Image (spheres, rainbow, N blue to C red):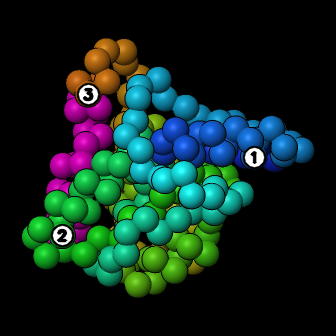
Amino acid sequence: MRGLPGMTVIVPADGEEVRQAVRLAAAYQGPVYLRLGRSAVPSVHTEDYRLTWGKAQVLREGDAISICASGYMVHLALQAAESLAEEGISAEVLGVPFIKPLDKATILASTAKTRRVITAEEHSCYNGLGSAVAELLAENLPCPLRRIAVQDSFGESGKPAAVMQKFGLTAEAVAQAAKQMLQ
């Protein structure tokens, strides 16, 4: 959907972000693709959180590596950052609900600080968050990038945890990618 002209793409992280994204989409004059998963997701945001059109949020400060995550992967990115912190690695986690328009300023500010980026999404490695961030960095701030996403494969049905594990969409995969990038 990101390739369609004029299309907005929103991938909320939790129920609170879904509620606010639906309201923003309903009020918006133009096409909006709201990508929602079927599984329950843990809460990341509190009721005082406010989703702002086209903006990402720094959910955890860090200076060693930036983790940009969308949808279900946001809570896993936060888990990965916690695991990395236990090993003395300071990961910055950005919740990126807007894939298009992409919050270039927030992502570039984080990247300028860390100089390494991981993207995490429960989506194809093509034409989603990872591709959008790769394009942004290639044109503005080239640096190492690792995309945690479904590789060139068709989706599958099954128990959500098993499917996520099969495709490597786990907190452990994010943490492992971070450690590899920092070596």
CA separation, marks 3 and 2? 24 Å
Q: Which mark is residue 80?
A: none
The amino acid pointed to by label 3 is Ala
Q: Which mark is residue 24?
A: 1
Q: Quadrant of the N terminus?
A: top right
Q: In the rendered image, which residue does mark 3 sit on?
A: 161
- Contact between marks 1 and 3 (CB within 8 A): the answer is no
Kindly state the secondary structure of the residue where label 1 is placed.
helix
* Residue 155 to residue 27: above or below: above
Residue at image location 37% in from the left, 79% down from the top: 115
CA separation, marks 1 and 3? 30 Å
The amino acid pointed to by label 2 is Ala
At label 1, counting other C-alpha atoms closer than 10 Å, the crowd grade (few under 14, some 14-19, many 20 or more) is some
Residue at image location 37% in from the left, 69% down from the top: 60
Q: Which mark is residue 85?
A: 2
The amino acid pointed to by label 1 is Leu
Q: Position of residue 18 (x, y in %)?
A: 59, 39
* Outermost residue toward the left in this view: 87
At label 2, counting other C-alpha atoms closer than 10 Å, the crowd grade (few under 14, some 14-19, many 20 or more) is few
Magenta range? 164-183
- 86 or 134, which lies in front? 86
Kindly state the secondary structure of the residue where label 2 is placed.
helix
Q: Position of residue 48 (x, y in %)?
A: 57, 58
Q: Quick one: label 1 or label 2, which is nearer the N terminus?
A: 1
Instruction: Write down the quadrant of residue 182 in the picture.
Output: bottom left
CA separation, marks 1 and 2? 35 Å
Left or right: 55 as drawn, with respect to 134: right
Q: Quick one: label 1 or label 3, which is nearer the N terminus?
A: 1
